Image: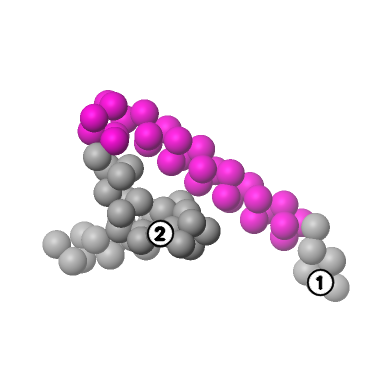
Amino acid sequence: MEKLKIFFEERAFGVCSKLGEKLNFPIDSIRLFFIYTSFLTLGSPLVVYVILAMTMKIRTYFRKMNNPVLFD
């Protein structure tokens, strides 16, 4: 079970950990919230999760493009 947990944590987008850091809230509670609400609402929070993940990836991409240190 621990290997499965590590597998998903390494390949997840990091949305829950980023939200936990920003809101100063336990990451496990945020993950459980996404899991329970996705079961109750038939997967609609998963759409929100994927949108947040894409937003995070796009923001890091643009930050790398605008960083003048990387072009030297």
For the residue carrying disc 2, how many other residues have a C-alpha within 10 Å: few (<14), some (14-19), or many (20+)?
Answer: few
Res. 67 image quadrant: bottom right
Contact (Cβ within 8 Å) of mark 2 with mark 1: no
- As helix, strand or loop, the secondary structure at mark 2 comes to loop
Name the residue that disc number 2 marks. Answer: 25
User: Among all residues in the image, which is located at the extreme front?
Assistant: 24
Q: Residue at x 52, y 58 (%)?
A: 22
Q: Which residue is mark 1?
A: 69
- Indicate the position of residue 30 as horizontal and vertical percent values: 35, 51
Q: Is residue 72 left or right of residue 23?
A: right
Crowding near the residue tagged with mark 1, few <14, some 14–19, many ≥20 C-alpha atoms within 10 Å: few
Query: Residue 49: within the magenta?
Result: yes
Q: Measured along the vertical axis of the image, is residue 72 above or below residue 21?
A: below
Residue under the image location 58 percent in, 50 percent down = 57
Residue type indicated by callout 2: Phe
In the rendered view, tell whether residue 36 sits above or below residue 41.
below
Q: Main secondary structure of the magenta part?
A: helix
61 up-or-down from 24: above or below: above
Residue drawn at (24%, 61%) of the image: 5
Q: Which residues are magenta?
A: 37-65
- Sequence order check: which comes first, mark 2 or mark 1? 2
